[in-house]
Image: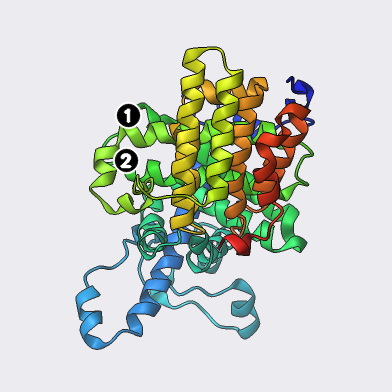
């Protein structure tokens, strides 16, 4: 009952390893390249301007009573300079012979006022990314009305006070464009990686001191990271063997869970409670018979092949977490956070054994792949389920094929059959 360990080795550098190489992910060291603070300030100012405009447009369309209530909730636009600045592109001013009004004039420094007021190409691109996030991308992160409201309303506001979160949002928005617009995939992927690398460099120091004042943006960013990693691999052809990638994603998710535990009390008492792990299911809820048979087969194989008592118990607990995860997935079809409990709650011994190629650990992972397959309508999760199950099928020996029969058959079915 041996597996081919060679199949577990990466055929190219893992994309998540690339992130660790660039930014050392959640490592506390200070060796990452620091992003240009001027670029960060320009990004924040440009994106704040976009949301101010969005707010003003919504305000102008409100009934008079609602507008009066919101009149005091204005955006803080101090980073933009004097309110009411009139932007005149240099070309139109020269061509029409027009001039800039006196209240827009700036002290003479050798640069015209119009040159100083015009947005740079970088600022315009970041504005487009923030607009894309608040128009489209936020809908791909959460499915419940409460969760989508947090991603659309609260998190962009937090980003204006925390550059690492702002860069994270822009990274995910650019990655979404890369996945949905093939003609701009290369450029958008490069922009996404640039923002992601800057975000990680700015994010790391905050992990030294998690408090009630910074736990919200830290948690928001840690929620973006797994989606980014899942999605970024789609900008390449998926590797023949995705197991090294999924091992890295499990490690990242477990790291994010540690952050949540540090501030669980603060998060549970605020709006971010809607983004936390799903509530446990009814212990009496029965699963479909085919899933029950598959999990029972896993338990039988575990009992027959695992001699170490502690390891046997760790695998048994992992199978129990799988059972709970299947219930959650059936109760909330398409809800991406149902993929979180398994990698977060299993014993640390189990992911380690997966990396080592222990067959029972891998067939447990294959059943987790079914949950990923059920989430395949998500732009971030697409393809991961079937790729994971197929990779396990190729990695374990013939004696283990019966143990993954159901998982292999399930990922061949259209996702709509589950939904």
Element at label 2:
loop
- Point out the image quarter for the N terminus: top right
- Secondary element type, mark 1: loop
Q: Position of residue 188 (x, y in %)?
A: 68, 55
Residue at the top extreme, as displayed: 308
Q: Position of residue 93 (x, y in %)?
A: 59, 78
For the image, the number of numbered tags is: 2
Instruction: Tell whether 240 sits left or right of 227.
Output: right
Please give the name of the residue rendered at 33% of the width and 45% of the height, measured from the top-left corner. 216
The reply to whether residue 19 is in sight is: no
Residue at 60% over, 72% down:
90
**Residue positioned 52% across, 79% down in the render:** 99
Question: Could you say where residue 85 lies in the image, as x and y percent from the top left?
Answer: 42, 71
From the viewer's perspective, tell me whether residue 113 is left or right of residue 7. Answer: left
Colour pattern of the rendering: rainbow
Quarter of the figure with residue 345: top left
Is residue 266 shown above or below 141? above
What residue did someone put label 2 on?
214
Gap between marks 1 and 2 measured at Cα: 9 Å
Residue 62, quarter of the rendered image: bottom left
Left or right of residue 363: residue 322: left
Q: Which mark is residue 145?
A: none
The quarter in which the C terminus is drawn is: bottom right
Residue on which disc 1 sits: 209
- Indicate which disc, 1 or 2, sits on the residue closer to the N terminus: 1
- Residue 132 appears in the figure: yes
Position in image of residue 170 (x %, y %): 54, 53
Badge 2 crowding class, 10 Å Cα cut-off, few under 14, some 14 to 19, many 20 or more, is: some
């Amino acid at each position: 009952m041996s597996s081919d360990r060679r199949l577990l080795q990466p055929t190219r550098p893992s994309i998540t390893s690339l992130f660790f190489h660039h930014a050392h992910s959640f490592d506390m060291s200070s060796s990452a390249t620091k992003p240009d603070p001027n670029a960060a300030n320009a990004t924040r100012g440009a994106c704040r301007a976009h949301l101010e405009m969005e707010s003003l447009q919504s305000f102008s369309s409100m009934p008079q009573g609602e507008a009066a209530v919101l009149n005091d909730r204005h955006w803080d636009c101090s980073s933009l300079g004097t309110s009411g600045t009139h932007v005149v592109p240099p070309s139109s001013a020269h061509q029409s012979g027009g001039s800039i009004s006196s209240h827009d004039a700036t002290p003479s420094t050798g640069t015209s006022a119009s040159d100083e007021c015009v947005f740079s190409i970088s600022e315009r691109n970041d504005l487009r990314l923030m607009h894309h996030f608040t128009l489209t991308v936020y809908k791909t992160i959460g499915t419940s009305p409460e969760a989508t409201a947090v991603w659309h309303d609260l998190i962009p506001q937090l980003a204006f006070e925390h550059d690492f979160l702002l860069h994270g949002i822009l990274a995910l928005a650019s990655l979404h464009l890369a996945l949905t617009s093939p003609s701009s995939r290369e450029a958008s992927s490069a922009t996404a990686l640039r923002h992601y690398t800057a975000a990680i460099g700015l994010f790391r120091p905050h992990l030294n001191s998690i408090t009630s004042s910074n736990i919200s943006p830290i948690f928001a960013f840690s929620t973006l990271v797994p989606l980014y990693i899942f999605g970024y691999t789609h900008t390449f052809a998926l590797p023949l063997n995705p197991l090294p990638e999924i091992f890295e994603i499990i490690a990242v998710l477990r790291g994010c869970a540690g952050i949540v535990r540090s501030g669980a009390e603060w998060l549970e008492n605020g709006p971010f409670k809607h983004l936390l792990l799903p509530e446990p299911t009814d212990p009496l809820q029965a699963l479909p018979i085919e899933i029950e048979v598959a999990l029972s087969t896993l338990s039988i194989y575990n009992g027959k092949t695992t001699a170490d008592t502690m390891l046997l118990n760790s695998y048994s607990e992992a199978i129990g977490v799988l059972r709970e995860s299947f219930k959650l997935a059936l109760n909330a079809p398409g809800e991406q956070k149902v993929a979180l409990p398994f990698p977060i709650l299993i014993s640390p011994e189990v992911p380690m054994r997966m990396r080592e190629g222990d067959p029972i650990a891998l067939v447990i992972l294959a059943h987790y792949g079914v949950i990923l397959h059920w989430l395949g309508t998500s732009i971030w999760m697409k393809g991961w389920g079937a790729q994971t199950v197929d990779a396990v099928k190729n990695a374990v020996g013939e004696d283990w094929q019966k143990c993954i029969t159901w998982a292999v058959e399930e990922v061949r079915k259209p996702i709509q059959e589950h939904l």
